[in-house]
Amino acid sequence: MSDVVLAATVVGVLCALPGCAENIRPDVEPDAADGPVGKVATVRGADGIYTTRVDATAVDTWTHVDLETGAESSDQTSWDLAAQRFHLKLNGGVSGTAGVEVAPVPGALADVTAAPTTGWITDAADGEDENMDPDYAFEQGDGWYAYDPQTHLLTPHPTVWVVRTGAGAVVALQITDYYDDAGTSGHFTMTWKALDGGGS
Amino acid sequence: MHSAATRRRPEPPVITSHTSLLSRLATVVAGVVAATSSLARADESAPADAAGATDGSAAADLDDLDPDEIIVITGTRAETPLAASPVVTEVVDRRHIVESGAETVADALAARPGLWLERGIAGTGVTMQGLGPKYVLVLVDGQRQLGRVDGVLDLERFAAANVEQIEIVRGPGSALYGSDALGGVVNIITRAPDEEAAELTARIDHRRATDLSARVGGGSARLSGAASAEWQRGDAFDRTPETAGTTIAAYQDARGDLRGRYRGGERWQVDGSADYQRRDLRGVDATATGAILDRRNLIEVAATAARLRWTGEGTSVEARAGLGYYRDQYASDQRGSGALDQYQETIEQLIEGGAQLDRRLGDHHRASAGGELLGETLTSARQREDGDRIRGAVWLQDEWRAGAAYRWLIVPAIRVDADTQFGLHVTPRLAVRWDPLDDVAVRVSVGRGYRAPSFKELLLRFENPGAGYVVDGNPDLRPEHSTSGQAGVEWRPRRWAWISGHVYVNELRDLITTVTVDGGGAGPQRFGYDNLGRARTSGAEAAATLGRDRLALELGYAYTRARDLDTAMALDGVPGHRVSAALRWRDPAEGLTAVAEVVATGPRPYQLAGGVVETDPRFDVRARIARRFGDRLDLFLGVDNLLDAGDDQLDPIAPRTLYTGATARL
């Protein structure tokens, strides 16, 4: 009889074990070594080239960038570009009221010294394609990135985007990266400079 | 569960794809066959226990069993001598498991040429007849197992220490087992509770991976039980030290299980079991974006089962019930950021019950009928809702012995499943065995198989926030189907010689494939699933065992052709050729056993973004030598993956490993 009791006890213990392992959910708070939290940050290099980093990781909100200040726009009107994950939109066309437009120019940022006279585009309504998104200027033609379906990596094309801002300034802008130093996607790095006296 | 005398089957052996390898093997084989045959003939004329063993148990342990001494159950769901089975069944018995140095069921199956064990992010799954892990049903004592990840049931999860034998039935088994049994069935039979044992095994390798296991069992003829426990740990391994990611995760596993048996006279038997396992896996992933993620899976698996059996004159009745629980906590912690931190908990639960009646009808028929009821649930953060389903089934089978001297055995079977997701499904099978001569058996079978859509395929909602692609499940999926033909010949001209050949073809349709739901451009896309795929696998396998008891050479070859019928491309990861050779030497007088195994695997194709890539051939070599000291102690020494095969991407197997250890019997 004692064998039966012993066996029943052990079985009971085994049956009580499932689901008892500790919870291994990572801390909700960022790690101590985690990167900065600000969504838009701009620094000016010694050569006069500005570098702007934009955190566009949010799935359902846009991060608005004011190229006049190099900072995140504090209101819904004084912005030039906005980013949400891999999407970039302009404050013009179907996306905004400030009349911002861009002209894509192949090449390096240093090679662009003046605004082109043609090739200006802005965000348009969804056209004949298989998605339901607006036809953002940054995604028309070849768009700003190349997509690798195997690795899902997005690599910026070597394109300079000449931007006419809402305030009428003209800047030459190049997207250099879509990932931050920790490898997180949705972090744009843009280098840019003012043309014809425009910019910040 | 069935009786536990050591079982074994003359197994399949060798084979491959490369001429240079073949020539090398041929040279070795020619020499060994001569020695093997002469030694085996000597054994044939002398009882094994007269071979100089110092004690009876040691001598018995070193004898091979004849196929008619080996009892199998998987092919017909009825206990049948292996030699009389109407369905081709391969058995990996306890002796082969121990002598190979296997720590897990995956290790124990790795040298079978007709099986391909592939390690991936979801664990090590088995491919059979060119059909991947999601088309192979894995059972433990006849009970379904939870925890498939991307269709893969990780065979590293099942410790070899508690396994009596592994039965492998190739080809569709859905007529008896229902869903998932398209490529075949692997049934892991655990050691019986009435096996007298009190043993402790310790093993350590040169990278300090450690395995400690203990087992105690026994009792009276009326009541017996066994308890076992095991603890394993090992460090992560990295084939590319220049990168941050690991090739194989560090692990720390612990498990405990109980088995009990009560016999009420000659007719009644009750078996019960309860198992619990905890696996802690820790690795590092380096993504293409440069992110470094510390990954951890904490997995708990629990199961309990009971079986009641009554055996009368020509009749037996069995009722069984089982519960399963699987919980996987997945945590990913990004270094330098919290943006990619993840935590996902997956919980699966299974309840199943069934009854089976076997009855002899006259001298020519043994009929079996059964019914099953299964309920399962799955909760996962990656699903749009919790999944649950109930499936009921009834099945019938008749074993009809016909012809002069009963040389024909005709076994029709049919099963009807009714599932809350896909409705009714019927799977038939007809197996025929013909014994034209006393030492020749011919087996032919045709049948169908099916696989029910998984909860993931039905209910997935996965979004990659970085690249913006989305994968959605499809709740309207139907089961995948296969129609199969199998034929084989087995010839046992001498007690020390066994040769077999086997051919097959599997035609699959309604395969669940990934499809683009919208967005056909170059950008991030939305994916889904649909029943659009068609495939065909075909092949041949050959096996031979020469010699037995003291010296045996086992050879095997498997040729596999697996094609997607829509693209005419080879199915990913399926090797066209595999060759194996194993040489076993046992010296009862000295208590020595030595085994050397070589498996050559031909190139495997993978469709990658840049086109089809073929892996290099793989050569697995492992060897083990063990010596028994008296009745109480065995010492062993071995090496796995002697040639250090494998790579970081398409073949992430464990590197060369030297190990040693001991088993003490109390």
Image (spheres, coloured by chain):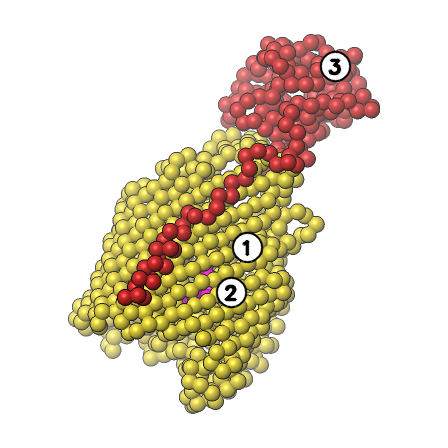
Q: Mark 3 points at which residue?
A: A199
In this view, B121 is above or below B44? above
Q: How far apart are marks 1 and 2 (CA)?
A: 14 Å
Q: Tell me the kind of residue under disc 3.
A: Gly
Q: Nearer the viewer, residue B168 or B405?
A: B168
Assess disc 1: are there few (<14), some (14-19) or many (≥20) residues with their C-alpha within 10 Å of its C-alpha. some
Question: Range of the magenta residues?
Answer: B158-164
Q: Residues within 10 Å of mark 3 (few under 14, many from 20)?
A: many
Please identify the quadrant where the C terminus of chain A is shown.
top right
Q: How much space separates mark 3 and mark 2, taking CA atoms?
A: 69 Å
Q: Label 2, on which residue?
A: B212
B316 is higher (above) or lower (below) than B492 = above
- Which chain is assigned red? A
Question: Are the two marked residues, 1 and 3, in contact with CB atoms closer than 8 angstroms?
Answer: no
Mark 1 sits on what residue?
B251
Pick whichever of labels 1 and 2 is earlier in the sequence: 2
Q: Residue A33 carries which label?
A: none
Which one is nearer the viewer's eye here, B434 or B29? B29
